[in-house]
Image (spheres, helix red, strand yellow):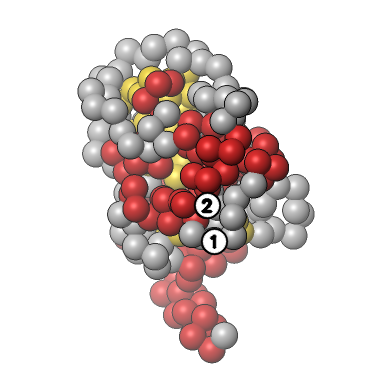
Amino acid sequence: MDMLRLAQILAERLGIEIPPVAMAFVSERADIAPLYRDPPSFCSLWRMAEIRPFYATAEQHLGCGIGGVVSGFMSEEGREEELARLLTDMCDAEVGTTEEISETARFQGGGAGVVYAPLWKMPLEPDLALLWATLPQMGVIQEIIGKFMWRDNPQGAVFTRPACAVLPIAHQNQKPALSLGCIGMRLYTGIPSRLFLLAIPPSHLPNLERGLAGMDDIGERLRRYAGRMARS
């Protein structure tokens, strides 16, 4: 499909402010410009991908222990308590537990690294597309591609901590997954609190493009969702 057209439609018709990005796990080093500085976290790589395509090694996903586990490039074995404390610090909520760490979704691991890029410049078939949107914008997207899910909940749901866990959830279930975003993600990415993270498997992107292109009342739909939020 035409990823450039989709990116343009998201910006021009839906008002998405931050360029969507894509990622693809690779089994061997990709012939793409490498990332020459080590990022502080898994989620910070998503923001770097707004600028240009690059290849990040497995080791470059380990700046944040939680992100290292979720990306599949780090084992939590022997580090459960350390990671539970990190989860507590990142999310500023109830104390994280070793059980929560063991149950946190993660990619299956293996491979050499990940290729990241702006969605419209992705040189490989992506595993996921990532975008940031307001809740009214999410409402319009959900009308087109269906409910967002958490784990195997068929009714759809959203998830807060850790934000990066929605990526393997979306990938494993091949359904869009939404995160409200943990504090760690906000600090590492600089994304404001009014924007939320949506991970979309590529099979849903053609429907999203067609749906947005065919809607002639997007502005009214956005206002309606915003009004419902204001009344709630």
In the image, taking residue 155 as reference, residue 58 lies left or right, namely left
Answer left or right for 119 relative to 76: left
Horizontal relation, residue 90 to residue 11: left or right: right
What residue do we see at 39% from left, 12% from top?
A: 29
For the residue marked with disc 2, what is the amino acid? Thr
Q: Can you give x and y, in whole percent of width and height, for residue 59 in the image? A: 40, 21
- The image shows residue 114 at horizontal and vertical percentages of 42, 25
**First along the sequence among labels 1 and 2:** 2
Q: Quadrant of residue 175?
A: top right
In this view, the residue farthest toward the bottom is 231
Residue 64, labelled with which disc?
A: none
Give coordinates of residue 229: x percent, y percent: 52, 81
Answer few, some or many: residues within 10 Å of disc 1's Cα (few below 14, many 20 plus, some between 14 and 19): few
Q: Nearer the viewer, residue 69 or 22?
A: 69
Q: Is residue 99 left or right of residue 226?
A: right
Disc 1: which residue: 93
For label 2, the residue is: 88
Identify the residue at image location x=38%, y=55%. 186
Q: Position of residue 103 (x, y in %)?
A: 69, 40
Whether residue 205 is situated above or below residue 12 in the rendered picture: above
Q: Nearer the viewer, residue 169 or 217?
A: 169
Q: Residues within 10 Å of mark 2 (few under 14, many from 20)?
A: some
The answer to the question of whether label 1 and label 2 lie on touching residues, with beta carbons closer than 8 A, is: yes
Quarter residue 62 falls in: top left
* Closer-to-camera residue (159/216): 159
Amino acid of disc 1: Ala
